[in-house]
Image (spheres, helix red, strand yellow):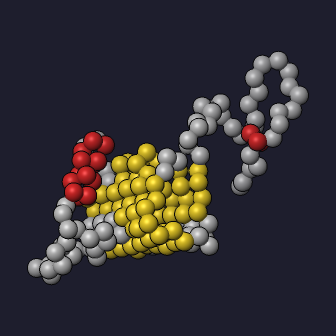
Amino acid sequence: MWKRDEAVRPPAAAGPGPSVPQGHDAGPARQPGKDNAHIGKSVVVKGALSGSEDLTIEGVVEGTIELRQNVLTIGPNGKITAKILAKAVIVQGHVHGNITAIERVDIRDTGSVDGDVIAPRVAISDGAHFRGTVDMQRAGEAKVEAKVEAKAAESNAPLLTPPGTPPSGAPVR
């Protein structure tokens, strides 16, 4: 059941002491720079997309997406053809391209991924579509990022290659 966010309402006259709205814990306040940006389903982005806040995509993105310190959510209407690098990735829509996450990748039941996934934790829900390889690193963030940098440094590698295709275009044996 959804509750209306009472934190945005002006506080009612209260007695002495701090008041915490019902249904909310007294956790840390929202940090600046940790807002959630949203790309609507009628928006088309072609090129490099980067940022320093969590991002939800419902539209179309072609190119690269880089959110190293933030969460990327591809909504049910999202159609992504991109190389993705983020702290965490939640897929509810369609992704064609490789995904690298520092913490985790979660492919939900409505999600579809055609590409390789590199992350320490990967969850694929029953009913989700996945075609590619999974590389789960147990080591910390530094090793995952080092692997990302090594892959990016490969010379003459096209931005998007079908899963299982070597960068030279030669057939897989």
> In this rendering, would 52 be left or right of 159?
right
Residue 23 pos. (x, y %): 71, 40
* Image quarter hosting the C terminus: bottom left
Name above or below for residue 12 compared with residue 143: above
Q: Residue at x 24, y 47 (%)?
A: 146
Q: Nearer the viewer, residue 91 or 158?
A: 158
Task: Examine the image and state in which quarter residue 83 appears.
Answer: bottom left
Using the image as rendered, state which of residue 19 and residue 127 is in the foreground: 19
Q: Is residue 171 above or below residue 10?
A: below
In this view, the residue in front, 68 or 3, is 68
Q: The N terminus lies in which quarter of the figure?
A: bottom right
Please report the residue visible at 44 percent of the width from the left and 70 percent of the height from the top.
62
Q: Residue at x 51, y 59 (%)?
A: 73
> Taking the image as drawn, is residue 98 in sight?
yes
Seen at 22% across and 68% down, the residue is: 157
The residue positioned farthest toward the bottom in the image shown: 171
Percent coordinates x, y for residue 37 in the rendering: 59, 54
Instruction: Tell me where residue 124 appears, x and y as whole percent.
Output: 40, 64
